[in-house]
Image (cartoon, helix red, strand yellow):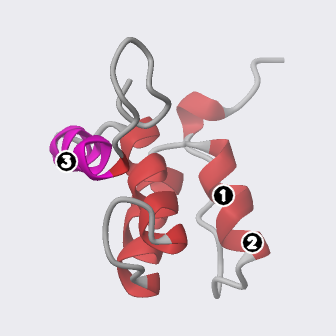
Amino acid sequence: MFLFGDGVETDAGEASKWFLAASEKGLADAQYALGVLYDEGRGLARNPEEAGKWVRKAAEGGHEDARRWLAAHGADQAPPPSPAAQPVP
């Protein structure tokens, strides 16, 4: 909502606060978004270590974009997809 100005003025700093709160509760979408904000320095200071930490948590939770981000950013190894993220034959 705050990140894209959906019904409110765009405010990446406010968005990062909400993403952090949701990330701490284990929501993979929020963890990925927070990691990207840290990576880009939007709404908070750029911090590659925090970016990697949050994106890795999202990937461990089965977030496919997070897995791709880790691979694209040269992470030593993206975690395998979670069983819940596996296609059913």
Q: Which residue is labeled 2 in the image?
A: 71
Looking at the rendered image, the disc whose residue lies closer to the viewer, 3 or 1, is 3
Q: Position of residue 23 (x, y in %)?
A: 26, 46
Residue at 45% in and 60% down: 37
Q: Residue furthest front?
A: 9
Displayed quadrant of residue 18:
top left
| Residue 12 position in % (x across, y down) | 37, 48
Residue 53, how many percent across, how many down? 38, 73
Q: Residues within 10 Å of mark 3 (few under 14, many from 20)?
A: some
| Range shown magenta | 13-24
Front-most of residues 28 and 41: 41
User: Quick check: marks 1 and 2 in contact, CB under 8 Å?
Assistant: yes
Q: Main secondary structure of the magenta part?
A: helix
Residue bearing mark 1:
67
Tell me the residue at 65%/79% (across/down).
Answer: 77
Labels 2 & 3 near each other (Cβ < 8 A) = no
Indicate which disc residue 59 carries.
none
State the CA–CA distance, disc 1 to disc 2. 6 Å
Q: Nearer the viewer, residue 72 or 79?
A: 72
Cα–Cα span, label 3 and label 1: 23 Å
